[in-house]
Amino acid sequence: MEVAEKLSWVEVCSIDDVPKNAGACVEVSGKQIAVYNFEHRKEWYATDNECPHKKQMALSRGMIGDAAGEPKVACPFHKKTFSLKNGACLSGEEYKIATYPIKVENGRVFIAVS
Amino acid sequence: MERKSIVVVGNGMVGYKFCEKLIAKAGKGTFELTVFGEEPRPAYDRVHLSSYFTGTSVDDLLMAPASWYPENDISLIVSDPVISIDRQAKTITSHKGIQKKYDYLILATGSSAFVPQVKGVEKDGIFVYRTIEDLDMMIAYAGKSKKGVVIGGGLLGLEAAKALLDLGLETHVVEFAPRLMPRQLDEAGALALKTKLESLGIQIHLNKSTSSFEGAESVNALLFADGSVLETDMVVISAGIRPRDEVASKAGIEIGKRGGIIVNDRLQTSDPSIFAIGECALYQEMIYGLVAPGYEMADVVVNTLMGGAKMFAPFDMSTKLKLIGVDVASFGDCFIAEPACKTLVLEDRNKGIYKRLNISNDGKTLLGGILVGEAENYNMLHQMVKNSMVLPPDPEDLLLPPRKGKSESAGGGLDGLPDEALVCSCEGVSKGAICSAVIEQDATDLAKIKACTKAGTGCGGCVPMVKDLITSALKAQGKVVKTVLCEHFPYSRQELLDLIKVNGLKTYDEILTKHGKGDGCEVCKPAVASMLASTFNEMILQPQHESLQDSNDRFLANIQKGGSYSVVPRIAGGEITPEKLIVIGQVAQKYNLYTKITGGQRIDMFGARVDQLPDIWEELVNAGFESGHAYAKSLRTVKSCVGSTWCRFGVQDSVGFAIEVENRYKGLRAPHKLKSAVSGCVRECAEAQSKDFGIIATEKGWNLYVCGNGGAKPQHALLLASDVDKETCLKYIDRFLMFYIKTSDPLTRTATWLNKLDGGLEYLKDVVVNDCLGIGEQLEREMDFMVETYQCEWKTVVENPELRKRFTHFVNSPKPDPTLEFKEERGQKFPKDWLVEVKK
């Protein structure tokens, strides 16, 4: 990801706080963010925790996987799926969620929120 | 060259469809396109308006999001109706004073509800059913009403009645004619519909002409011409539609005697640069009140503007609807009668089914018909009329519903359908277009077909036929049509389960590496989790299984609206001591939980925060409760009646047996949930014949029924064995359940599984009772293993600090979710609504 401005990273949790191949919710300056430990791809992702469909704080409790190679999360409420890379809705609707830069250093997880 | 300016007056479904078709054919920006809408939001799906009452949001109903218009270079002006047309200057003026020049003007003003001038019609509490604003007003008013009356027993009136029913009101329908839906149904068909609707709690009053609305400020009763009175708290008028022709009329455009803007074959009005489409247009003395002909009109105008020669023709008004859950269809010439034709009629008052087919006097072709109560053959019958297909030698077979075990929709007759047959009339898609999309564009599932051809995206009525066409086109190509789990596993559930067992694979990762590809998804993960659980029965929250579980399983509780969870302890057979009842009451009080008795004879506690779950369960476990597995695809409850212990009719101890059965199969994970019941005598108070497996006491022992289902499509359970003793009964249930677990597709209840099972009940009997496959003992051993390895998942969590740590909303803060909000109703707490306030 190319980011022009300098990111300010916030430490949010330890890698052990997020189950492998699943998500967990963290609070960053009053905002709920879902953090995913995508062990199977050796990748980490961060998105909004809120599913835009019914405005439920639930995406961190959704199952993750891929659709034709695109990493995704499925909302536990009505199984709307979203790309973990760009937040686009993959189940054919107009919703979109925000994604956030994330990195892991020394067993700690960091997120950049503008 | 300057772009031509097109102004569309009206942003309803047809006005929107015109824009969509124009952009698709001409490309965006070719014309300067301006749309004026009277309502405050972009066009929405009026056909499915009643789903607004059951929770569909406005956004879900929109034909396209507001952003679609600017993205396609269309200026959309909402809340601003056009009020005048200057035909000389070729300009229009809007209510807010916007003037706009046009080269072509498209009138898509639609219709308004026809409100008869009855005395008192201006009173409060009288509504029409047309726009989302109408609906919002109805919803607000329904909050203080108990009873509602719909005037009009036609299609829209019955839709409105459904809305009142959904709002929780006692619902009445008043119709002027001697029967319901007089335009679509004959007398016998209307009677079948009336009987069916009455059984659903709607009261129907025919031959009633309203002479006044009574009440001071607000309506409180209807007075009829025959002197009778019907009291009510609110009224919805749905007595027909009026074409919106006032702007056209003011501009001197020719209008029909009874309203409607007169148009020619190209939908041109008396002014050739002005077109009218949809419900405001009068074509050959006819207003078309359905969406499909409106879309066709839009298509003709787009074609004309692009220089094409397409003409509009009298439109087939055949239609199939689901009205309040009852199928109603009429097609072709439905009213033609003897001697002009021969009529075949099937009337099944027991099931509430009426079917009429009109066939030509030479017996060769179908002319039209009516279907009430069961209309699965509609698409095929409709095609037979439209394409003048030759009838089979015994046309009476067409009256019977598709038999169990066979394809439920059109079936074999598809091959006889010509390529030009119109399958989706909303979007005008033919059989040939669908089949070639399957073959040439690799559109091998419904979603892809919708994207490629738009078939099935309108009213959705053709979807079963489209699915069958996809399957038959694939088969014709020699492609194997196979149900696979998902894109990650090229196997059916049964095949994958065999591979898991043969290779002893105990984790998802191993299975995915060996037999799948990619990273998995929300379909295959829980399916595999279920297979592993019903084979090895390891605790589902062990680290290697945790991420496979559906959200409910992952937190061992059902996620509810708003994000809180429910708590459901097991109460086997519905038997509970006063001491345990008190514990439930105390726990619910302490944690402020909403409590409700369930249909499965136990008690649900709602509104727990995820971080409270382990504490709540700790108290319940300490009092001797176990998980009720309400969150799992597994055995839920075994319901019972009191049986011979208390009941003067009971012949066996049904409660005792129910507890034994529930404790044997508790925690057993299966492709779908399992429900059971035991009745103490033939009176069947436990309703065992509606369960996945049900037991009824006889003088000599027990009768075992299997594969029943309540839910959306109720099905009675079928007798598998009679007068057997307890041990034999349990043996058969062991075999039955394990056989189902081994062979079913994912998320398939036992009823559906049996319907698809080759050989049906007879074969199942052969396997379970006669042991024709010789696997009886093996199935019993596998069940014994499941019973021996059972553990209460909540007890395990409560005693394990590592597992308990997972039950928190934030991993970086002990705070609960600040967005959880509750309100109070009837002395208990409820989650905040996520959409409209719907009174239940």
Image (spheres, coloured by chain):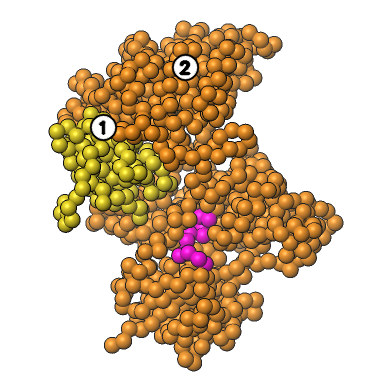
Chain colours: A yellow, B orange
Between the residue at mark 1 and the residue at mark 2, the CA separation in whole angstroms equals: 27 Å
Rate crowding at label 2 as few (under 14), some (14 to 19) or many (20 or more) other CA atoms within 10 Å. some
Q: Position of residue B788 (x, y in %)?
A: 36, 9
In the picture, measured across the screen, residue B287 lies left or right of residue B292, that is: right
Q: Secondary structure at mark 1?
A: loop
Q: Which residues are magenta?
A: B39-49
Q: Is the residue B224 above or below the residue B734 in the image?
A: below
Residue drawn where x is 48% and y is 15% of the image: B625
Q: Is the residue B755 above or below the residue B315 in the image?
A: above
Q: Position of residue B174 (x, y in %)?
A: 72, 55
Chain on which label 2 sits: B
Residue drawn where x is 41% and y is 46% of the image: A55
Residue drawn where x is 42% and y is 25% of the image: B613
Tell me the amino acid under the disc marked 2.
Glu
Tell me the amino acid under the disc marked 1.
Val
Q: Quadrant of residue B389?
A: bottom left
Magenta-colored segment: predominant secondary structure: loop
Q: Are marks 1 and 2 in contact (CB under 8 Å)?
A: no
Q: Is the residue B374 above or below the residue B528 in the image?
A: below
The numbered mark at residue B619 is 2
Q: Is residue B752 visible in this depiction of the protein?
A: no
Q: Quadrant of residue B160?
A: bottom right
Chain on which label 1 sits: A
Q: Position of residue B314 (x, y in %)?
A: 51, 71
In the picture, measured across the screen, residue B656 lies left or right of residue B797, that is: right
In the picture, measured across the screen, residue B239 lies left or right of residue B838, that is: right
Q: Is residue B41 magenta?
A: yes
Q: Are marks 1 and 2 on the same chain?
A: no
Residue drawn where x is 47% and y is 61% of the image: B44
Q: Which residue is mark 1?
A: A18
